[in-house]
Image: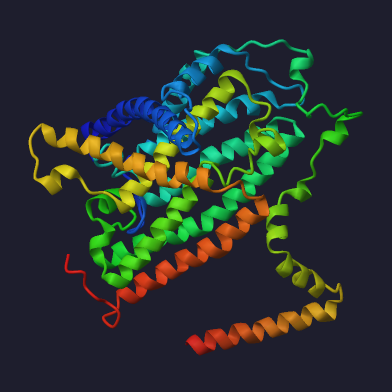
């Protein structure tokens, strides 16, 4: 089998090997462009301190932004939905089993209805 | 496939990448200059000269490239290289200058959609590798932004492919197919309205893809001091600047290829050596108009949205718009709703 023949699903197609070649060449071009620039800086000076708008930080832990904030945009935009979902999480196993049964009934109704 | 054919493809890919890199960087910076000039005039300012982005690049390349003390140096330095390389590689799969894509038989629109993610992802990685709280917040916002605009973008692309699949049997995602068969001619009046909606969606996804107003919350200079780029300087910042310029050309060329693939030489019946010249000039005009409507006008007219407003805008109104577009095009394919345009 020739590895240069594109993978074709009938609808979509691509040639991974050509992409890798193209990407490596693009990386080399960018590396050459980067080489045109200046690479030096003054190590271990105030220059390398993170920019904090002049705020004083006593220890590095204060610089940490929690991963839990990643989806803030989503949870804030859809807080009505998330608040409803949260209130459904009672922590009671019987409630979860009931939800499971209800969803299975809906699922079978949809599947049987379609069939 | 014979060895000669294989070597031909590889050689074509190598030369194409070099050519496209020069083209993408030059045209990207030129359009950046035009965009800044136009925006300045819309705001009753003189603005910088059109060649200013070229001087900005020179300035960035002669400045120091600082690596902050809390950064992960190899990731911090690698991210801008990946961003620019991926942007250049994507251009190879798109029709540029009124011609078929250089790698038209080697990848389709689905591949382009995935490649478009890489520069944004590289910016996210660079932001997280900066070791700065501003950059981390910017990187988190960029991730949320990516998840927001992908949904309406995917619906738009799938709808176009679905319509082409109905009209032409093979490879509906092929950009060569899309480029040679304008979508407008495949539908009636109802479908035309659907495609207008999809065009609007794609025009509004563009500022999100390239983090421009009103969807530039990941950078937000006045709020998080440049966000994921806050710690970048010198040649690293210069590479991100170039990646942004090339990605603008990528998004502009994508919209031109899908919705405005017409060549002036065909319309006016121009042949011979003048045909490609006329087509290249016409492509640049189309690209300028797309960038004007999708980037310049939008960023002058609308203030920056908060990240939750961005999520809402992409997930509710724009997703609904793309779904309505999909439904209209589906209805158009039935004999009940199909009213021919007589094209």
Position of residue A33 relative to residue B115, above or below, is: above
Outermost residue, front direction?
Answer: B44
Residue B123 percent coordinates (x, y): 59, 36
At a point 47% along the width and 65% down the height, the residue shown is B321
Residue A51, image quadrant: top right
B9 horizontally vs B202: left or right: left
User: Residue B138 versus residue A22: which sits nearer the camera?
Assistant: B138
Residue B101 percent coordinates (x, y): 29, 41
Residue B343, image quadrant: bottom left
At a point 55% along the width and 40% down the height, the residue shown is B120
Residue B5 percent coordinates (x, y): 22, 35
At a point 51% along the width and 43% down the height, the residue shown is B300
Q: How many marks?
A: 0
User: Residue B314 versus residue B51: which sits nearer the camera?
Assistant: B51
| Colouring rule applied to residues | rainbow
A63 horizontally vs B326: left or right: right
Residue B111 percent coordinates (x, y): 42, 47
Residue B157 in view, yes or no: no
Position of residue A105 relative to residue B288, above or below, is: below
At a point 29% along the width and 50% down the height, the residue shown is B260
B190 horizontally vs B120: left or right: left
* Figure quadrant of the N terminus of chain B: top left
Outermost residue, right direction?
Answer: A58
Position of residue A15 relative to residue B331, above or below, is: above
Residue A55, image quadrant: top right
Residue A38 in view, yes or no: yes
Position of residue B306 relative to residue B49, above or below, is: below
């Amino acid at each position: 089998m020739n590895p240069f023949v594109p993978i074709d699903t009938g609808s979509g197609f691509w040639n991974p090997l050509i992409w890798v070649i193209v990407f490596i060449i693009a990386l080399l071009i960018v590396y050459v462009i980067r080489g045109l620039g200046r690479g030096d800086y003054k190590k271990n000076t105030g220059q390398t301190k993170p920019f904090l708008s002049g705020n004083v930080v006593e220890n590095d832990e204060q610089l940490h932004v929690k991963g839990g904030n990643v989806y803030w945009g989503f949870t804030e935009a859809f807080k009505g939905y998330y608040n409803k979902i949260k209130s459904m999480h009672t922590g009671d196993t019987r409630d979860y089993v009931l939800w499971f049964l209800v969803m299975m009934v809906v699922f079978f109704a949809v599947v049987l209805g379609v069939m | 496939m014979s060895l000669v054919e294989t070597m031909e493809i590889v050689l074509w890919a190598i030369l194409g990448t070099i050519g496209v890199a020069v083209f993408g960087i030059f045209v990207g910076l030129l359009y950046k200059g035009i965009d800044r000039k136009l925006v300045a005039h819309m705001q009753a300012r003189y603005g910088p000269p059109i060649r200013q982005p070229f001087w900005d690049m020179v300035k960035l390349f002669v400045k120091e490239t600082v690596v902050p003390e809390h950064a992960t140096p190899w990731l911090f330095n690698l991210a801008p290289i990946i961003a620019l390389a991926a942007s250049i590689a994507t251009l190879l799969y798109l029709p540029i200058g009124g011609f078929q894509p250089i790698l038209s038989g080697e990848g389709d629109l689905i591949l382009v959609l995935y490649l478009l993610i890489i520069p944004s992802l590289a910016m996210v990685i660079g932001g997280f590798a900066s070791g700065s709280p501003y950059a981390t917040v910017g990187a988190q916002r960029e991730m949320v932004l990516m998840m927001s605009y992908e949904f309406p973008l995917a619906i738009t692309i799938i709808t176009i492919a679905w319509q082409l699949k109905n009209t032409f049997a093979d490879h509906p995602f092929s950009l060569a197919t899309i480029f040679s068969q304008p979508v407008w001619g495949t539908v009636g009046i109802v479908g035309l309205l659907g495609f207008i909606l999809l065009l609007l969606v794609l025009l509004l996804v563009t500022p999100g893809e390239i983090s421009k107003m009103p969807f530039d919350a990941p950078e937000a200079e006045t709020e998080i001091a440049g966000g994921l780029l806050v710690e970048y300087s010198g040649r690293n910042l210069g590479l991100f600047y170039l990646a942004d310029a090339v990605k603008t050309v990528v998004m502009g060329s994508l919209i031109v290829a899908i919705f405005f693939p017409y060549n002036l030489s065909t319309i006016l019946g121009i042949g011979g050596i003048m045909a490609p010249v006329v087509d290249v000039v016409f492509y640049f005009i189309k690209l300028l108009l797309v960038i004007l409507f999708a980037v310049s006008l939008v960023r002058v007219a609308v203030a920056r949205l908060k990240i939750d407003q961005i999520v809402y805008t992409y997930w509710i109104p724009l997703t609904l718009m793309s779904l309505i577009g999909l439904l209209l095009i589906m209805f158009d394919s039935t004999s009940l709703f199909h009213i021919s345009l007589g094209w």
